[in-house]
Amino acid sequence: MVDINEVAENIYLIDNQLLSIPKMGCVYLLNEEKKALIESGPATSASAVLDGIRRIGVRPEDIAYVIVTHIHLDHAGGAGVLLKNMPQAQVVVHHKGAGHLVNPAKLVNSTVESQGQEAVARCGEVVPIEEHRVQAIHDGDTIKLSEKQVLSFIDAPGHAPHELCITESRNGGLFTGDAVGMFISENEILMPVPNVNPELCIDTLKRLMDLNATTIYFSHFGVSNKVQQNLQLAVDNLQVWDDIVIKAFTQNMFDSAAEKLIAQACARLGPVRGMESLYEYLTTVHIPLCATGHVKYYQQKYKA
């Protein structure tokens, strides 16, 4: 059965069973006059998402917006599938990613190149979205769902150039996609995500601190009211990794840098061992991918 929780007034978390792993990925339903879904999840999560929406008491046909924080397959890959059950919904996406939802071939190919064919298979088929159903968003744009609920969009590069964060006015919360990292809610552990530009990511995190949000709604996974603490922790985590990689560079030991990052991150996962499928994915797939990307950024920066 799909796990559902009302995490704030009129905001429901639906565990989308990302990659068939509980408590790794979620979407949020905003049950307002105009109903919105934050994130679609991948195509393989579509049935769980639709089931969750119905169990909340909302008809998928009444969804007005599917809002994706960025176009990576685990966040937006299922949007085209969901639209088959949401005839009036618009897909809201960063303007830099809009074209990739209309024609996803390049997006899928880049995923294969960076993560392998298996990653695409795990996420399922990416169904193209008709151009007139895609709404491109820029920094500062807003969408009004009701008198008490207005969403405001923030350009949030670092993890990806097409990343958005979203504030919601009813509760004062902040949807962060992957901009802040991966939160393991049961243990309150904040882990890295693969970042295209770690330095831009830190800049984004510092701007998010200025918003004084009451709550962070993580797409991976869950909710935290320790907003400033987690934003600062995300900065600290990135700076620790920066220090490890830069030290390896100065010592001409770049080849060992990724191994050191993996060891540093995995050492923090002891409390997660009981969540076997999540622990295995983090240690064998997610963290190595993050570490490789972090090292690659600095290799390119310093042309090592």
Image (cartoon, helix red, strand yellow):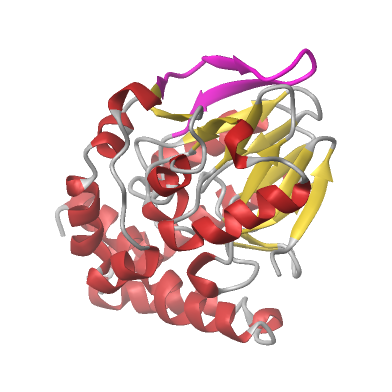
- The N terminus appears in which quarter of the rendering? bottom right
Residue depicted at x 60% and y 38%:
37
Horizontal side, residue 244 vs residue 13: left or right: left
Write down the region rendered in magenta.
136-156
Location of residue 111 in the rendering, given as x and y in whole percent from the top left corner: 26, 58
Location of residue 300 in the rendering, given as x and y in whole percent from the top left corner: 19, 52
Is residue 143 visible to the viewer in this orientation of the structure? yes
Q: Is residue 96 magenta?
A: no
Most foreground residue, 86 or 284: 86
Q: Residue furthest right?
A: 9
- The C terminus appears in which quarter of the rendering? bottom left
The quadrant holding residue 217 is top right
Residue depicted at x 28% and y 73%:
118
Residue 157 against residue 88 in the figure, above or below: below
Horizontal side, residue 223 vs residue 107: left or right: right
Location of residue 19 in the rendering, given as x and y in whole percent from the top left corner: 48, 70
The quadrant holding residue 142 is top right
Q: Residue furthest left?
A: 303
Residue depicted at x 51% and y 27%:
88
Location of residue 49 in the rendering, given as x and y in whole percent from the top left corner: 59, 54
Residue 155 against residue 233 in the figure, above or below: above
Horizontal side, residue 279 vs residue 128: left or right: right
Task: Count all numbered tags in the image, as a single digit.
Answer: 0
Q: Is residue 144 magenta?
A: yes
Most foreground residue, 218 or 187: 218
Is residue 240 visible to the viewer in this orientation of the structure? no
